[in-house]
Amino acid sequence: MANRLQDYIGFCLLLTALIAVAGCGPKVRPGKEFGAVRVPFAMLYENQISGTVFGQKIDDPIGLETDDAGNIYLVDAGNNRLIKFDRDLKPVREAGGFGISEALFNSPTYAALDNNLNLYVSDAGNQRIAIYDSRLNYVDMISLIDDDDPAKFGRPGGLAFNDYGELWVSDPDNSRVSVFGGNTEFNRFVGDVDSYAGLLLTPNAAAKGGKGRLLVSDEGKGRVYVFDGFGLYLFDFGYDVFKHPAGLETDRTGHIWVADSRQSTLYCFDINGNLLYSLGTYGTAGEYSFNKPRDVAVLTGDRIAVSDTGNDRVMIYKILYQE
């Protein structure tokens, strides 16, 4: 009996020691997934996309998207077309044109790439999402016209994919976001009247955030809403900063970049919605002025693109970070 008691006491002491050793290991810091936290302190003008491309002058550029190879996809709304540029800003191909038939647009706005490098474009005037491959060949579309319930969907706005391959489509007409599954079938609404929190008013753009989150800019409420991947409201920010938040994007450090179309300013926030940096004032010329900027895209090499819609150009900047 005494030997068993001694064995039991010895086992308990050994277990306690192992727990103590395990507790001395390195701790995972918040935001570790993004690496070292870097704060932007300056942005240097690098280049711009403007002028005539494939025989037409760029007019009201809105949506921006980029792939891992550094290619840039631009929604040239005024010309109802989609343009692909390589990483050196050389135009590669265009698609679209005005119309109601397949592969044509009527007032397109934003775009988003899925994991298969298919490009989804909000074709607001035709009330649908047009789908192209990375070569800008037309693939398919998601019609948002429901004959059984004409009020179910409005004109599409911003687009984003969550970690589960679901497509989020902002619907400013109905003050909510529509979520479509990987098979492009409608799944649910986010931010509508059935939500307990995170009630949207005029959702504009959408973007994937850090930690599997989804971000939605709400122009009507002047803030950015943060949801988890399923659509559960987490928090919102920027109500004391924004006038009309439009396009937004998250960089590899987890920082959130937001273009404010009314203030003609680009803002940078940390993953928790704390303001870190801002750039730009209203102007119709100059390297650091904007006129109704509508979207943002994070490029390779710590660069960022801003669609300066009112000035018919896309501005490219190099971000300088304070380590």
Image: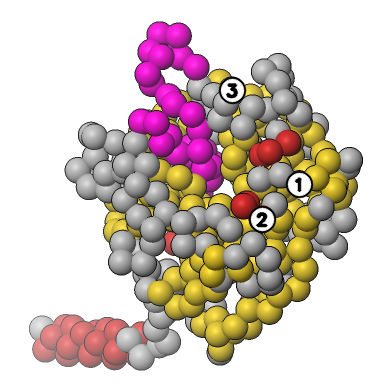
* Residue 207 visible within the image: yes
Indicate yes or no whether the magenta region holds residue 171: yes
**Apparent side of residue 96 relative to residue 152 in the rendered image (left or right):** right
Q: Is residue 266 visible?
A: no
* For marks 2 and 3 on the same chain, the one whose residue lies earlier in the sequence: 3
Which of 112 and 81 lies nearest the eye of the viewer? 81
Residue type pointed to by label 3? Asn
| Mark 3 neighbour class, 10 Å CA radius: few under 14, some 14 to 19, many 20 or more | many
- In this rendering, would 319 be left or right of 144? right
Circles 2 and 3: CB atoms closer than 8 Å: no
What residue do we see at 54% from left, 33% from top?
Answer: 182
Position of residue 231 measured from the top left corner of the image (x, y, whole percent): 35, 44
In the rendered image, the residue lying farthest to the front is 284
- Say which residue appears at 19% left-offset and 43% top-offset: 196
> Which three-letter amino acid code belongs to the residue tagged 2?
Asn
In the displayed orientation, state which residue is furthest to the left.
1
Element class at badge 3: loop
Q: Amino acid at mark 1?
A: Ile
Q: Which mark is residue 311?
A: 2
* Image quadrant containing the N terminus: bottom left
Q: In this figure, which residue is indicated by the disc labeled 3?
A: 126
Q: Which residues are magenta?
A: 145-174
| Label 2 environment density (alpha carbons within 10 Å; few <14, some 14–19, many ≥20) | many
Residue at image mark 1: 58
Residue 292 lies in quadrant: bottom right
Measured as percent of width and height from the top left, residue 115 is found at 65, 46
- Asked whether the residues under the numbered discs 1 and 3 touch, taking CB atoms below 8 Å apart as contact, a structural biologist would say no
Q: CA distance from mark 1 to mark 3?
A: 21 Å
Residue depth check, mark 1 versus mark 3: number of the one nearer the observer:
1
Q: Residue at x 38, y 58 (%)?
A: 243
Between marks 2 and 1 in the image, the one whose residue lies nearer the viewer:
2
Establish if 143 lies above or below 300: above
